[in-house]
Image (cartoon, helix red, strand yellow):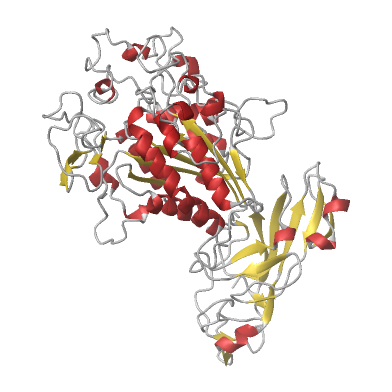
Amino acid sequence: MTWQRSGVAVALAMGCAEVDAAPPATRLMSTVILPVARDLPREVDILFGIDDSGSMLNNQANLARSIGALFSELVTPRPERPNTRPIESLHVGVITADLGTPGSRVPACANSDVGDDGLLNPIRHGLAMRAHQPWSSAGRRFRPTRCENRPDQYPSFLTFTATSDLTDFAEDFACNAILSGGASCGLEQQLEAAYRALVIHPALEGVAGNSHPNAGFVRDDAMLAIVLVTDEEDGSTRDCRYREPGDPDGTCPMDGSGSRLGVFDSTDPSWSSADLNLRFYMYPPGGAQDPTWPLNRYIDPRRPDRGFTSLKPGRPDLVLFAAIAGVPIHLPQVAGTSDPNDPANLDWTALLGNNSDGSEGLVTMSPEGPISMRQRNADPNCSTRVVPACRREGSAYDPMACDTTRQYFAWPARRIAEVARRFAVTYQGNGMIRSICQNDYSDALRTLGRRITLRYERFPECLPRILETTPRICCDAVGQPFGCVPSGDASREACTPASTRTAVLVNCVVRESLPSSVSAAEWCVPARGRRPGGRDANLRETCLVDQLPVVLGERPTQGEGFFYDTTPGECPQRITFTPDAALARGSSAILECIQSQN
């Protein structure tokens, strides 16, 4: 829930160690009105953008082995996190990073125009994937026996509900995620594929007549997690067929000069390298040889109505971005921190620097050999690559290993890491990145699960003030100042923790205004903890939500309605609804309270 102060200005209680013997006669009361946001359903939509190039087969198998850590974290939270409730519904979709090589024919890129086009379940829908289905290539040996050798086995995306089997769901994911093993396109457009899947294509639910393969994947109120799994840098090439309305970055003039599709032409000498892969590493970012879309296309901190966050109008914090990609296995940490699994401890400046030319990225020696996160750091031993971002965990350094079959390595994923940094900085830790070179992705995926559930633990947000209670209890369960406004009355009795065993109410009313699609006669009923409330100023029908008495620090054990929630957690006080009393979709509500002014 989101709370905003409105109406009369109020002061927070700064301290109170006693209970009033009697309310002072001079106490002034006023009405405080706070808007209430509708409870969000515990739903998550997760898009996996999986690089299907030939070097990724073992990484995809690693992902399939580790995926249970994510799903378990979401649907069966750990006992040591008692305030975390399970996610009730999951949508999980898979796309590839293959968007083709428009205008050029490149070996192994089976569909030059659109590749797999960001279509969910590319095994079923991808035009490029048809040329190298996983059961007809080396990938077949990693596929669970549950996988059938037919493209129509699965729908566009997988759905998990309370009746689903977690083990079967993880195997179903593996059937969709193991994609490599044969000839596949090595020119990846990871960010653009996700953008096309979610923004360009009609992926939102509730669109009448929408029969697109991606339709219904993104639910209105679900959290959205975008997870990229890749061992190369993002090569999202400017193709002005997919320009944004208004062209906010000025990259696609109407004369058609904005596209950079010539980067796929191996005979074109105007690029930074004759090697097609190096053309996405050796250019100065933002310069004439930069073929990529600006990162603002995917996340613009100043414009949440752009990019991925545009899918959640007014709630951009409901979008998370994660990547298992080309970054060091041991990421630089903020000084004084010790938990490498906490995304908040990552030192983004040490990893990427702040210069737009990429010249400040991390350069160091890892146990597996030299690594780099710089933009144009050519490998002196290998003319066809830059210095890797990481090498396979535990492998022996081979200075002459210039291909992944001799000593596996991953290219620096600077653009992908920068998108993760923007999400992390702008939306309170909603971005994270881990190394594709690790032998086990379980910790990375478990951390992602925790980040998702943490966002739910932060809903609702805290009330902007402590509410007074009836009876008036001034201290919490351990005797700390809590629910009274100091009166200066020296005759008050001492407050003890035992006094908080009394169930209390707050002098507040929740008034819910219903959308035209919801009937008050059907909704404002005792089974939902409601009674009719007349009409609001806009002539919408309203319900009054019943309040349940509750011992401070506990939840009610029976009844439906709302209660003053001071259970342990990041938020010391909030209004919470019982499950059957959650606000209706499309409704709005206000909390009206009579509170002291002094």
Residue 2 is left or right of residue 269, and the answer is right
Residue 185 is left or right of residue 88, and the answer is left
Front one among 520 and 195: 195
Locate residue 256: give its quadrant: top left
Locate residue 325: give its quadrant: top left
Residue 308 versus residue 525 in the image, above or below:
above
Residue 483 is left or right of residue 15, and the answer is right
Residue 241 shows up from this direction: yes
Residue 422 shows up from this direction: no
**Rendered residue at 40%/38% (across/down):** 60
**Rendered residue at 52%/47% (across/down):** 170
In the rendered image, which quarter contains the N terminus? bottom right
Front one among 337 and 468: 337
Residue 552 versus residue 356 in the image, above or below:
below
Residue farthest toward the right in the current orientation of the protein: 521
Residue 215 versus residue 363 in the image, above or below:
above
Residue 511 on image: x %, y % = 75, 57
How many numbered callouts?
Answer: 0
Residue 69 versus residue 426 in the image, above or below:
below
**Rendered residue at 59%/88% (across/down):** 498
Residue 519 on image: x %, y % = 85, 47
Residue 316 on image: x %, y % = 52, 42
Front one among 355 and 122: 122
In the rendered image, which quarter contains the C terminus? bottom right
Residue 114 on image: x %, y % = 47, 17
Front one among 564 and 440: 440
Residue 185 is left or right of residue 482, and the answer is left
